[in-house]
Structure formats: structure tokens, C-alpha cells
Image: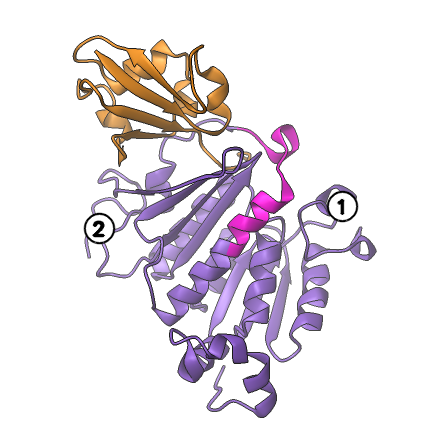
């Protein structure tokens, strides 16, 4: 099935060929999970800070659930903060 | 104790352009003049936030930082100037803010980060602006604000990205805290020195923090409570996403109302 993947800020560099601006249509398996899409596109898990499924925040413990459906939009933002001291 | 009962002619003139706003008026201006705000961090975010809050007539600004001004700060930390290089940031900021608005009280705390001192200061203000640059400080500020039920206006910026949110911590709200948002931080996602930051992006975040602080103090409009504003300046893409409380959060989890 086809879904739209949007990668924001520096994650945009990880978008595959065929992307327009920060979005790309990708093919994923039926019943795919957000984490499978994240791994498939080599987004480091610690950089997938905010995951939005059709605009709704997906908490880390929900990212292994097979919630993605045909035509959905998965958007990912990196963390924004400075160093740990 | 702040106790402004009426506005002098000069104050009416100084604040006239915001007193004209129906959300503020004279009553709101008096509330601002009777408010105390703690700003932790006088860097890229704290610079614009402190300047706009001083200009708007917050009665007392408490500034906390222990760094000194360096040449490489000046590209984004606009409360400081070349003449301040080598001086404590707090002293430099007090100097600028007093020149901007000599009628408010500005207290500078030039001290290393200390959780006990932080808890004391948080407990005596009406709102806290988190303009720090590290998770240790951010988590401690969040915890102190949660424990004292003091509203927290939190911002962050790096590269061309920014985030802002408000954690009201009032008992009626079921909104998350900062720890709910950054619950799994185990390693640094990057430092300013390693990644850089465009000064105006941090400025934008600091300005939004100042706006949200005024809204929190005057209780008007819709703040970013329960929402996170995401800014991607490379594409000038701005989103607000709804946040949820983490029931397992070590700071606010399990606490209702």
C-alpha cells in the first residue's frame, strides 16, 4: 500500500529519490508499523522524536502497533534541544 | 512586594500601544507590573525574551545564568554587546534591560546551576521562562515548576529548527510536562557548538516565549498549553501538535488534577 512520508528539518536529508520538498510517496507492507517505516528509511530511532500519524502524535510505546493504512501520512520531526551535561 | 495600584502618566505613555489592546487594557498592564518572571538562561532565547518582557513592563524580572559573554555569542545573543565580552551574562543583560526600561525591577543571579536555588526562585515567581541549553537544567526547571505549580514557558532552537510549548501546571489542566515530551533522552541529540544555529531562528522562539508569558500572566487567548509548536525555518513550516501526558512520567505521571 502507498502512504506519504514527511521528514522535517535535518531529517529531510534522509528522503529517498522522488521526494518533493519534504514529502515522498512510499510503498509499505499491509499492517506496517511506524517503527518499521522509520527503520526502512534509516531514520535513527533517537532522531525520530515526534512521530505524527495523520497529524496525531504517536507515543513511543505505540510505534510498534500496525496502525498504518493506505493513504495515511506519517510525519517525523527530530528533537530540538542542546547538549546533555 | 510588588504593589502597583495605579499608572503614572509616563507609564500610560510608555505602555500605551499595548494598553490599547482589549486583551490588556489598564487592568492587564497593572497585572504585568505586579508580576514576577524568572528567566533561566540569558543566551539566544533569553535575550529576546528578556528584552520584550522588560519592555512590556513585567514588574520584576529575575535573571539566572552563570556564563560570561563570548565573541561567538553575539551573532544570536542580542541582549549582550561587544562591550560586554568577558563580563557575566547576567550583569550584561541587567545593564541592557535597565537602559530599555528603568522603571521595572531586575534581579540578576550570577550563579552556577543549583537545584535548591532554582526551587527557591521558582517558588516566588508567577511564571518561568526556560531559555537554557541543556537537558539537565531543563529537567530540573520542569520538576521545580511542576512541584510549585508555576507555569513554565519552554523553548529550544538549533540549526534552523525551533520548538516552543507552555506547561501551565494548574491543577485543573491535564496537560503533559516537559519530561513527558523528552522522556527517552539518553544521549545528546547535538549541541549548538556542533550544529550551529541561525540567530533569528532562536530569536523567533524567544519572542514566542515572551508572547506566551504575557498570555499566561494575563490569562487571555489560547496558549500553547498541551501543544508543541514546531518550527522548520528551512522551509518556514510551522505546526502545532497536540501533546499527551505520559502516565508513566516520573515527574507528573499518575498525578491527576
Q: Which is nearer the eye, B204 or B134?
A: B204
**Tell me, what hue is chain A?**
orange
Q: Residue A62: x percent and y percent?
A: 22, 26
**In the image, is A85 to the left or to the right of B19?**
right
| Residue at far right of view | B83
Asked if residue B116 shows in the view, the reply is: no
Q: Residue A1: x percent and y percent?
A: 21, 11
Q: CA distance from mark 1 to mark 2?
A: 43 Å
Q: Considering the numbered disc 2 on the image, is that residue within a helix, a strand or a loop?
A: loop
Q: Residue B95: x percent and y percent?
A: 72, 67
Q: Which is nearer the eye, B97 or A4?
A: A4
**Tell me, what hue is chain B?**
purple
Dot 2: chain letter: B
Any magenta on residue B174?
Answer: no
- Disc 1 + disc 2, Cβ < 8 Å: no
Quarter of the image for residue A51 reads top left
Q: Residue at x 38, y 53 (%)?
A: B166
Dominant secondary structure (helix, strand or loop) of the stretch shown in magenta: helix
Q: Which is nearer the eye, B15 or B57?
A: B15
Q: Residue B88: x percent and y percent?
A: 73, 55
**Nearer the camera: disc 1 or disc 2:** 1
Q: Residue at x 53, y 76 (%)?
A: B17
What residue range appears in magenta? B190-207
Ranked by sequence position, the earlier of labels 1 and 2 is: 1
- What residue is pinned by disc 2? B255
Quarter of the image for residue B169 reads bottom left
Q: Is residue B132 above or below residue A20?
A: below
- What residue is pinned by disc 1? B70
Q: Residue at x 45, y 69 (%)?
A: B124
**In the image, is B239 to the left or to the right of B137?**
left
Any magenta on residue B192?
Answer: yes
Dot 1: chain letter: B
Amino acid at each position: 500500500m502507498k502512504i506519504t512520508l514527511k521528514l522535517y528539518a535535518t531529517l529531510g536529508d534522509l528522503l529517498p529519490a522522488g521526494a518533493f520538498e519534504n514529502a515522498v510517496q512510499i510503498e509499505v507492507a499491509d499492517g506496517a508499523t511506524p517503527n518499521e517505516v522509520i527503520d526502512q528509511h534509516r531514520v535513527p530511532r533517537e532522531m525520530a522524536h515526534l512521530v505524527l500519524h495523520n497529524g496525531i502524535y504517536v507515543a513511543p510505546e505505540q510505534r510498534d502497533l500496525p496502525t498504518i493504512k493506505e493513504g495515511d501520512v506519517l510525519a517525523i520531526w527530530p528533537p530540538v534541544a542542546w547538549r546533555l551535561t | 512586594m510588588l504593589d502597583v495600584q495605579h499608572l503614572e502618566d509616563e507609564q500610560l505613555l510608555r505602555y500605551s500601544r499595548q494598553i490599547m489592546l482589549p486583551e490588556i487594557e489598564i487592568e492587564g498592564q497593572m497585572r504585568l507590573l505586579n508580576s514576577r518572571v524568572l528567566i533561566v538562561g540569558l543566551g539566544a532565547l533569553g535575550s529576546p525574551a528578556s528584552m520584550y518582557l522588560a519592555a512590556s513592563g513585567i514588574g520584576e524580572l529575575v535573571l539566572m545564568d552563570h556564563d560570561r559573554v563570548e565573541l561567538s555569542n553575539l551573532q544570536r545573543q542580542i541582549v549582550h554587546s561587544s562591550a560586554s565580552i568577558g563580563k557575566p551574562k547576567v550583569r550584561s543583560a541587567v545593564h541592557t534591560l535597565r537602559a530599555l526600561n528603568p522603571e521595572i525591577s531586575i534581579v540578576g543571579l550570577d550563579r552556577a546551576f543549583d537545584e535548591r536555588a532554582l526551587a527557591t526562585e521558582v517558588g516566588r515567581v508567577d511564571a518561568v521562562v526556560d531559555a537554557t541549553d541543556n537537558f539537565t537544567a531543563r529537567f530540573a526547571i520542569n520538576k521545580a515548576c511542576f512541584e510549585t505549580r508555576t507555569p513554565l514557558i519552554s523553548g529550544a532552537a538549533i540549526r534552523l529548527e525551533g520548538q516552543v510549548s507552555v506547561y501551565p501546571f494548574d491543577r485543573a489542566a491535564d496537560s503533559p510536562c516537559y519530561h513527558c515530551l523528552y522522556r527517552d533522552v539518553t544521549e545528546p541529540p547535538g549541541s549548538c557548538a556542533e550544529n550551529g544555529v541561525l540567530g533569528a531562528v532562536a530569536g523567533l522562539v524567544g519572542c514566542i516565549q515572551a508572547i506566551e508569558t504575557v498570555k499566561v500572566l494575563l490569562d487571555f487567548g489560547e496558549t500553547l498549553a498541551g501543544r508543541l509548536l514546531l518550527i522548520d525555518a528551512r522551509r518556514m513550516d510551522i505546526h502545532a501538535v497536540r501533546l499527551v501526558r505520559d502516565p508513566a512520567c516520573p515527574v507528573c505521571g499518575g498525578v491527576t488534577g
